[in-house]
Amino acid sequence: MNFRHRRLLVTLALVVSLPLAAAAPAAAALLIDGRLDEPQWSDARVVRDFVVTAPYTLGKPRLATEARILATEQGLAVALICEHPPGEARTRTLKPRDADGFDADSVLLMVDFEGQGKVGYEFAVSITNSYRDATITNENEFNSDWDGLWQHAVREEEERWTVEYLLPWSIATMRDGDGPTRQIGVFFSRYHYARGERAAWPGVHYERERFLSQFERIEVPRYRQSQLDVMPYATALADLVDDRSDWNGGLDLFWRPNGSLLLAATLNPDFGQVESDDLIIDFSAIETFFSDKRPFFTENQGIFDLRMPNDGYHVYTRRIGGPSDVDGTASDIDGALKVIGGGLGFDYGVFAAEEADTAGRTFAAARLDWPRDQWSVGYLGTWVDRPFLDRTAQVNTIDYDLKPTAAWRIRGQLSESRVEEGAGAPAGPADRDGVGAWALAEYRHSARWRYALELLRFDADYELNDLGYLERNDLEQATFDAKLERTGFGAASATDTVTWNLIATARRNTAGSTLTPEYELERVQIFKGGTQHVLELTYEGEGVDDLISRGNGDVQLEPRWSVFDVVATPRIGRWRSTFGVWAFQEGIDDWAVQLEPSVAWFATESLTLDLDLWPRRSREWLIWLEGNRLATFERRQLLVDLGANWFPAPRHEVRLRAQWLTLDAKARQVYEIGPGGRLVPVAEATEDFAVLNFGLQLRYRYEIAPLSDVFVVYSRGGLESIEQPREGQGELFSRATELRDADQLLVKLRYRF
């Protein structure tokens, strides 16, 4: 079926769904304003027995919190009533959507709509009505790329403040059933910022190995809801470098004929032009991972969020529309389709995407999951066609998650990859089959002690990166992790919690070469009031680096140490600060130091400025040149990250983000890989060099309605490499500011119908 036919199917789906959309329930009877004055709230279930989970004492919190939960035809209504008398400080800060931290008093609502402990949703709101939403998978892995459609409101009073929620039943897919009720999992949390105290119900914490499955299960009436969201967007781009303009547009369609099925389609999807990635200058052999903000690829994507050790992902959606196989520039996407649902005890998902032009790639994935209370088993298959490379790649994975007792959790995956390359491939015809497998056993011995053992093996021919993300294959690894958490230091102590973590990792490649073993000891101390002190000591034993030479031989490395020490304070008055020092051995046997000071200034409730200034100095930075040649350099590197968030009026947001990254490298010694992987100095010169990277984004956003926005974005930046630089660090920094590879003004309208 060609793409023209798929467009016809999408159009037919729109026509067929209009009557269903018209038959959707009327507007909610509840007015979400934080007042709780409607009579329906008298029928709500009330929860008051919150306990302290940070520090993890499970004691009675200083301030009382009450939660109310009520299922209505329009959705799940929840209220959190937070006692807060005048004598207790209230911390208020406005933050953009999905900010990592609010720097304010806040509450959390988390819901597992299927009650199976597989996929949950976080809905966080601060006292200033700033908000964040995220998906939760694999018990405690959060992804804030997802943006849901839900209502919330905050009301402050002298003795308390209240947050009111309404989550429509269409916000997530959930298996349907015939009974009058459904079981969901819920979790409530309240954070008192001035004292650094978190209270929750039930008494579980997201940093523990079992979190999502420990939500409180409650029965609610079973409601069915249909919804159609049509979300077109249009952009106008003025390129100030090439003096040209460009117009673009696309459409996202999300149709939920019932609560158990989502049908989604996209034409020329929005690539997230209003978002900015962090600047990276990377000389390593490991690819940099970036998150994805495109609505189609984040909506109900949790079922495909199957992860692996070492930050691996089976589905990495930034591949779709990413650097093309032809010239490395961003690819255009013609369209994509996605179906997610549940029934007969299973959850399932299928998606397919097709890039434009004859060299465009085709991506597909299919997921089936069978969850139960104490175990789950699933399958994920992916397939990619890359015509320009005459290559197809397929990966099939079986995953399992077993929870035989409250103390034990055992999970893992068994996966195979199949790659076929024809005569048009760069290296000619070839077929490769690989296998990857890993298993992790976690044991909670007591409230204080937790142990884990992880084993993995990825063949040299196991290839995941056509659609997934894997730092490396050709690896055998064993990791032991022991964690001790101490609480109950008493009222006279300044300490709330101290956590010790010991991690030991042994690894080798499948050819039998011993890679550098690693032993890490971490101590985390949390003080009353929220200040944190983190100390990490790492020792890497003797072993080889088999990636640094890009396949031109293993490099033998001597043992080395690193130490990282950081103190982070919460907001105190108008300031929040962090200061860290990272000292580590690199190169042959020398040391490098990086300072990591960060500061945030809360000028007003609606204006925050923050600055990171991270200088790094090393005398023996080792990088690959070509073939079996490597060289050491004296490196001076500076990262400056300046940001500002201003909310001049409700629904108006102005954001500034400017980053500078400069690297100045002075050549010291050239080496070649000798017998046994030892580096042998050679009488050969290499040149000094510098790399400059600069990015600036000034963004204005006006929220017309939920998920409907107008953006005006000015962006500028560039990347430059300089041979034999003559400038000093300050001059390089100034020169980076002048980079203008990109200089553009973008206006974007996104509207949800």
Image (tube, rainbow, N blue to C red):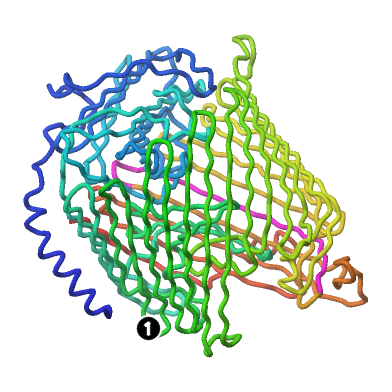
Residue 738 position within the rendered picture, expressed as x and y whole percent measured from the top left: 58, 67
Q: Which element type, helix, strand or loop, lies under badge 1?
A: loop
Q: Which residues are magenta?
A: 629-652
Q: Is residue 476 above or below residue 84?
A: below
Q: Nearer the viewer, residue 681 or 415?
A: 415
Left or right of 274, for residue 16: left
Left or right of 201, for residue 742: right
Q: Which residue is mark 1?
A: 357
Would you identify the image quadrant in which residue 221 lies? top left
Q: In the image, what residue occupies the spot 51% across and 79% down?
A: 420
Q: Is residue 23 above or below residue 56?
A: below
Q: Nearer the viewer, residue 482 or 381?
A: 381
Give amino acid for label 1.
Asp
Left or right of 443, for residue 590: right
Q: Is residue 136 above or below residue 356?
A: above
Q: In the image, what residue occupies the spot 70% across and 59% down?
A: 730
Q: In the image, what residue occupies the spot 34% across and 76% down?
A: 246
Residue 4 position within the rendered picture, expressed as x and y whole percent measured from the top left: 23, 79
Please tell me whether the stretch drawn in magenta is mainly helix, strand or loop.
strand
Q: Nearer the viewer, residue 585 or 465?
A: 465
Left or right of 307, for residue 350: left
Residue 143 position within the rendered picture, expressed as x and y whole percent measured from the top left: 44, 47
Residue 626 position within the rendered picture, expressed as x and y whole percent measured from the top left: 76, 77
Work out which quarter of the rendered image holds the N terminus and state it: bottom left
Asked if the stretch drawn in magenta spans residue 657, the answer is no
Q: How many marks?
A: 1
